[in-house]
Image (cartoon, rainbow, N blue to C red):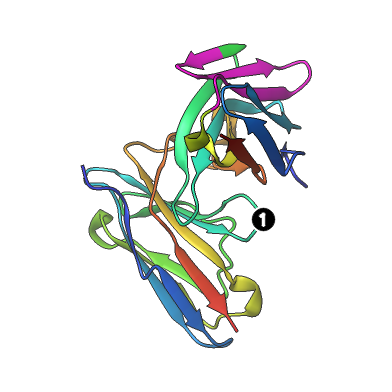
Amino acid sequence: EAGVAQSPRYKIIEKRQSVAFWCNPISGHATLYWYQQILGQGPKLLIQFQNNGVVDDSQLPKDRFSAERLKGVDSTLKIQPAKLEDSAVYLCASSPGSFSYEQYFGPGTRLTVT
Amino acid sequence: DQQVKQNSPSLSVQEGRISILNCDYTNSMFDYFLWYKKYPAEGPTFLISISSIKDKNEDGRFTVFLNKSAKHLSLHIVPSQPGDSAVYFCAARWGPNAGNNRKLIWGLGTSLAVNP
C-alpha cells in the first residue's frame, strides 16, 4: 500500500513570496490533515478535511494560509505572503475515518523563509 | 498553554535496558492517549495508544501505562534496541464532547538514544 505522498520535500523562499504544498493521501482515506511542526515542537493541526469538506480549521491563519481538497483526494496548502515565522515542516496525514487517532503521515515539506 | 507535556527533551539508555518516556496532561476531557515515533526526515508513525478507561496497554516490547489520578502516562520499551533511537511524541485526543474539535494535542517530544 502506497503511503502519503508530499511534494516538494524542501522549499526555500523569501518573505512575502508565495508557496504551495501538495499532498496525496493513502487511497480510500476520507480524512486529510495538514500540520505545521516548528523545530523543537510537536505538530500543530492547521486544517482537517473530511472528504472535500472542512471539519476543523480553527488554527489556520486564514489571512495568509489557504487549503483545498478538490474531489476529496489530493490537497494543496498555500501560504501567501510568507513570513519568517512560517519556517517549519508542513506535514500531511490521512486516516480512514474522522477523528481517528491513528493517522498516517507523509515525509513532510521543510519550508525555510529568509 | 501546553496541555500535553513531555518534560524530558532527551533520554539516553543502553541497549537491552528499559527506556521509560513520560508524559503529563492537564485536561480530563481527553479520551485517548497516543505515542508516535519519528525518525529524522520522516513523518511521525503511530506506535501505541491507550483509552482513558484503561490503565495499561501492551504491544510487544512497548507498554503504555496511564495514571488518571496523576494525569500521567508513560511508555516503557523493554528491551531497548538501537533502532528505537528516535523522537517520541505523546499526544492526546479530545473526547466526544468536543464536537468537531477532536484534534490531537501533541507534546514537544523526547529524543531517545539507545546506545549499543
**Residue at x-position 50% and y-position 53%:** B40
Q: Is residue A106 shown above or below A80?
A: above
**Residue at x-position 25% and y-position 55%:** A73
Q: Is residue B101 rendered magenta in the image? A: no
Residue A60 or residue B20, whichever sits in front: B20
Residue B1 or residue B85, whichever sits in front: B85
**Residue at x-position 40% and y-position 56%:** A107
- Relative placement, left or right, of B82 versus A42 is left
Q: Circle 1 is placed at which residue position?
A: A40
Residue B28 or residue B85, whichever sits in front: B85
- SS class, disc 1: loop
Dividing the picture into quadrants, the one containing residue B101 is: top right
User: At label 1, which amino acid type do we have?
Assistant: Gly
**Residue at x-position 57% and y-position 75%:** A63
Residue B106 or residue B48, whichever sits in front: B48
- Residue A96 placement (x, y as % from top left): 31, 37
- Residue A114 placement (x, y as % from top left): 60, 84
